[in-house]
Amino acid sequence: MARKTNYSFQKSEREKIRQKKKKEKQDKKQEAKNRKAASRKEGVDIDPDIADIEPGPQTSNDSED
């Protein structure tokens, strides 16, 4: 029976380590998500050649008379 209490202790220690790693992973994911969102807000690199193009049908500059 003495071994069983030691086993339970080891098992609980493993569980604590697993939970700690899980929390660190979640924190790391959240930090990356926040960093990605912040970079989108700050500086959106838009190609100056296509910056003024609007989606959809374009007006024609040629006159076909």
Image: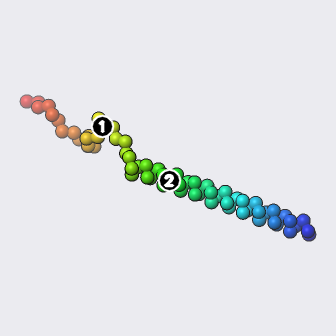
Q: Is residue 16 left or right of residue 46?
A: right
- Residue 5 in the image: x percent, y percent? 86, 68
Residue at coordinates 77% horizontally, 63% vertically from top-left?
13
**Residue marked by disc 2:** 33
The label on residue 12 is: none
Q: Does 50 sit left or right of 65 as displayed?
A: right
Residue named by callout 1? 48
Q: Is residue 22 left or right of residue 52?
A: right
Q: Secondary structure at mark 2?
A: helix
Q: Amino acid at mark 2?
A: Lys
Above-or-below relation of 24 to 3? above
**What whole-number distance in Å separates the C-alpha atoms at marks 1 and 2?**
28 Å
Give the mark, 1 or 2, whose residue is nearer the N terminus.
2
Residue at 26 percent across and 40 percent down: it is 53
Instruction: Answer few, some or many: residues within 10 Å of disc 2's Cα (few below 14, many 20 plus, some between 14 and 19).
Output: few
Quarter holding residue 15: bottom right
Q: Where residue 46 appears, x then y in whole percent?
A: 34, 41
Q: Position of residue 30 (x, y in %)?
A: 53, 56
Q: Are marks 1 and 2 in contact (CB under 8 Å)?
A: no
